[in-house]
Amino acid sequence: MSIRTRLLVILGLMALSIFYLVPRDVTIREPDPETGVMGNRVIKRVPLKRGLDLQGGMHLALELDESKKVSADPKRDLQLALTVLRKRIDEFGVTEPLIQQVGDDRIVVELAGIRDPARAKAIVQRSAFLEFKITNETRALEKALPAMDRVLRGMGIKAEGAPTQPSAVQQLLGGDTAKARQGIADSAARKDTAATASRKDTTSDTSAVVGGVLSSLIQPSGTAGSEIPGEYAVPETAFPRVDSLLSIPAVARQLPRGVSLRWSAAPTSVGVQPVRFLYALDEPSIVTGSNLVDAQAQLDPLTNGPIATFELDRAGGRKFGEETGKHVGDYMAILLDGRVQGRPPVIQSRIGRNGQITLAGRTLQEAQDLALTLKAGALPIPLKIVEERQVGPTLGEDAIRSGILAGVIGTLFVVAVMVLYYRTAGVLAIVALILYVLFTLGALAMLDATLTLPGLAGLVLSIGIAVDANVLIFERIREELAAGKTVALAIDEGFSHAMSAIVDSNVTTVLTGLFLFQFGTGPVKGFAVTLVLGVLASMVSAIFVTRTLFILWLNRKPAMATLSI
Amino acid sequence: MRLFANAKYDFLGRRKIAYLITLALTVPGLLVVLVRGLNYSVEFTGGTLMQVESQKPVDVGAVRSALIERGIEGAEIQTFGSDRELVIRARVAKEGTDANDTQATAAALTQALDATLGAGSYTVLRTEAVGPKVGGELREKALMAILLSFVAVLIYLAYRFEWRFGVAAIIATAHDILASIAFIGLIRLEVSLFVVAGLMTIIGYSLNDTIVIFDRIRENLHLRKREGFVEILNRSINETLPRTVFTGSTALGSLIALAVLGGDVVRPFALLMLFGVIVGTFSSIFIAAPALLEIEKRWPGPAARGHMAPKPSAPPVRKPQPVGR
């Protein structure tokens, strides 16, 4: 190869590396700080991707959580979940998110530079399964309570401090239960319908079994006239206990078919202590979120509270209209992931394709997140987090700073030793080393590889090792010179004889690097990539660049009798 | 300036001393590992790690009792760097625990920190919550990666040199891994993914070093057919000694820079690699070359004289020479 071609090749490689490292326009998708609307923004930056450990962010590995719902076709459900997550995260506004399937049963989500990891986690994990159900008006729960308590008593579970519990509820509801019951009876009498008549009967039924564990904790929520049928109040402190008691199969069986029990999403303050509402709901749902086509977050012009409005597709709208038409005057619970959102509103008239969910006492951002997940669709099966890594942005900044410092000091050391030990040849090796760093970074940018903290360490380490090829060559040249060969011949033989050692030793490093890449996750993969690229780049720089520099050196001083090496 | 030029040390003659040194250094460490086990990071055991920076100095005891109050016992709590930075590790206690537990533990850690440090007066620098299943997989994968890279290197060396060289190189590398594990055990280094990456890099470096010497042995076997095997081994080691020392020094220089300046996350890796570079250099000379000699003694063959090495320019081998006189 002529010297001209060699120089051209080197210049070409340099140009290519520089081309890939030039700061370029990157489109990032993020919400507008004022309106919250997603938009594209273009910024300029060096196209070297930094790993989560360097810029901060979150790494999640997710699997289908089949503890609550068994998947009929896990492969399909995972694909579906992947699509849903892509849509959600696209709207969430993260630059270059990574969402991919790993192995057969896992999804990995990497969100770089996020500020609010808890929020991101909630968005990823939320099933976002929306259901509309009519609250039960046949007092099914109250009728079932005595039987439930009998079952529990049979199992040896009794009310803890039974006499005090009802009074706690009385206090919560801001009046004594007897009066409340009286109120219910009064209102029932006023309305004088068949349903309320039966309600009156059961009211007297329940008073007979006060002292049962569930009947003492579960009380109809309403006071005079303001009650919602099928709504019950449970002191927030007793909520976990009641929930676990109700989920005992023998207890759950006491409830008639076609009625389900659901909790409200959040506790409500009534009087001094918070209570949790329990709802008896008629199955099946009148419509579900699978019929949803659009959702938006807004501020309710009347209350100024956040709401999420939604729009159903044609089929969903028709069904919704029919069902709500049948149930005018009844109460409709809106459920998200099995929890009732807000208190069920009364159906004033037939509802069409549009509706809204009121999120009392929550922020607009929560409404936005809800709209976002509703729009992206429900997860077929809930997801569980099997691995989570979060790195705050400051840690990465510190790491980069110390990594660069270590790199600079390490490099200066190598430069000093090379120049002191090999003199002019050492200077040539340093030029080759600079090109080596350029090539490695260029290759990283070209392959769109991610620079991680271990990767940075690998880069610093490989600077120390990169000179090895040069050292092998220089030592060989020295040996050839010591054996009495002429300068030109010694250089020639030095390069050709060192070649086999360089190639063989580097191939083994590349082999171990490839296996490391195969098994490693995120940061370690980054290390393997820089190591492998570094070794390859060091071979190019040592064998090709240094050789060319030597040829140039010889050309300038053809009569050189001794070599500064 | 030329260090170790024309060195003529009898490395092979001193190999027994070297064996003693390596045994004396490695066995205690391995015993520690056997007795106390390795200190695996949560990535491998499954569990929850949280690193936080508080605005004021942290009372470790208060954090510990707040954790025990919330049902998290046996968590490791350490200050990290300064007394305002804290690392809490709660490992998964039993096998088969659900992944959701690590999430629940993370929530409990946050509650405990809110209670002791005050919500909002600390920043979470890093969180890791790894389910035990993922941790177990990772352990398997790490072991597989090391074994597979051994096999791949053996095949490559068998192809480029011949099987004896491959086996000798693997013996030397296995020695380095054992010694490194002993080192990890002795200084109680936490075995994280990063440290495993360091272990793999040591494999790469040690092989690299061994191969440079083997390459010279291969060459000298062709050139100096009259010399005995031991002389050729010694000669090859001595001839490559300047390179061995120089490259080792530059690698050590970069690693010292990393260890001192690279920050807390990089330091364990840098320390391990420092040890690895030293032991890798040692093993190329005192383990790999003697191993080659032992193999040659037991299974002498023409191949050991470089017969099969791909050197088209080399003159054809006339007859196998007796070795190890």
Image: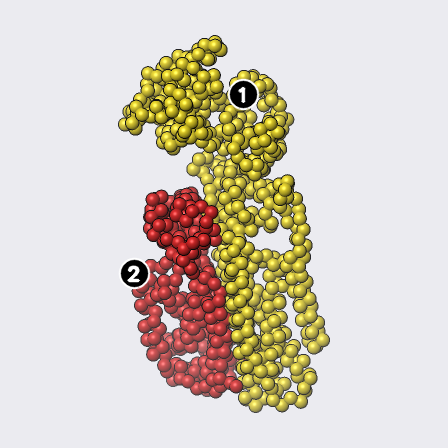
Chain colours: A yellow, B red
Looking at the picture, how far across and down is residue A377, in whole percent?
A: 57, 36
User: Would you place residue B67 above or below residue B249 in this image?
Assistant: above
Q: Mark 2: few, some, or many residues within 10 Å (few <14, many ≥20)? A: few
Label 1 amino acid? Val
Quadrant in the picture for the C terminus of chain B: bottom left
Label 1 SS: loop
Looking at the picture, how far across and down is residue A311, in whole percent?
A: 62, 29
The residue that appears at 62% across and 70% down in the rendered structure is A435
Which-is-in-front pick, marks 1 and 2? 1
The residue nearer to you, when weighing A241 against A365, is: A365
User: Would you place residue A297 above or below residue A456 in this image?
Assistant: above
The residue that appears at 54% across and 61% down in the rendered structure is A400
Looking at the picture, how far across and down is residue A91, in whole percent?
A: 60, 42
Residue A190 visible: yes
Q: Chain of mark 2?
A: B
Label 2 SS: helix
| Residue matched to label 2 | B35
Q: Chain of mark 1?
A: A
Tell me the quarter of the picture where residue B196 sits: bottom left
User: Would you place residue B82 above or below residue A253 in this image?
Assistant: below
Q: Which mark is residue A346?
A: 1
Label 2 amino acid? Val
Q: Which mark is residue A458?
A: none
The residue that appears at 54% across and 85% down in the rendered structure is A479
Residue A247 visible: no
The residue nearer to you, when weighing B68 against A281, is: B68
Tell me the quarter of the picture where residue A419 sits: bottom right
User: Would you place residue A565 above or below residue B255 in this image?
Assistant: below
Kindly indicate whether the residues beneath marks 1 and 2 are on one polypeptide chain: no
Q: Mark 1: few, some, or many residues within 10 Å (few <14, many ≥20)? A: some
The residue that appears at 53% across and 40% down in the rendered structure is A123
